[in-house]
């Protein structure tokens, strides 16, 4: 499954909001430096979908706030 994610970093609390049609807004505590936010994003989505983190891949948007994620 491919999902579209908008990421907000440096937030006080982690949260995943589903807006239907595979669109998500994800709040992360990390700063977008040294890949910390992407690692936190993968770990949070792993918990949210109940999928091992090895099966979640950022397909595009590695340095953007808008990302396409493959969850499989």
Image (spheres, helix red, strand yellow):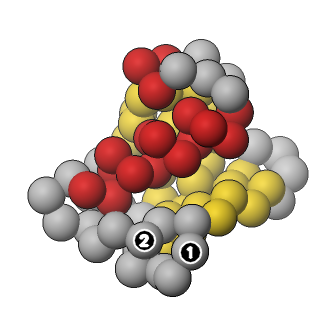
User: What crowding class fits label 1: few (fewer than 14 Cα within 10 Å), some (14-19), or many (20 or more)?
Assistant: few
Compared with 59, 11 (above or below) is below
Q: Is the Cβ of the residue at disc 2 closer than 8 Å to that at disc 1?
A: yes
Residue underneath mark 1: 13
x, y percent for residue 51: 61, 23
Q: Quadrant of residue 36?
A: bottom left
Q: Earlier in the sequence, mark 2 or mark 1?
A: 1
Query: What residue is rendered at 48% in x and 80% in y?
Result: 11
Left or right of 26? Residue 34 is left
Q: Quadrant of the C terminus?
A: top right
Q: Quadrant of residue 15?
A: bottom right
Query: So how many labels did they put on this image?
Result: 2
Compared with 27, 37 (above or below) is above
Residue at disc 1, secondary structure: loop
Residue underneath mark 2: 29
Left or right of 20? Residue 17 is left
| Distance Cα–Cα, label 2 vs label 1 | 6 Å
Q: Is residue 25 visible?
A: no
């Amino acid at each position: 499954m491919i999902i579209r994610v908008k990421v907000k970093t440096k937030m006080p609390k982690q949260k995943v909001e589903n807006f239907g049609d595979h669109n998500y807004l994800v709040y992360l505590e990390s700063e977008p430096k040294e890949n910390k936010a992407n690692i936190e994003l993968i770990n949070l989505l792993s918990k949210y979908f109940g999928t091992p983190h090895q099966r979640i891949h950022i397909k595009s948007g590695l340095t953007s706030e808008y990302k396409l994620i493959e969850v499989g």
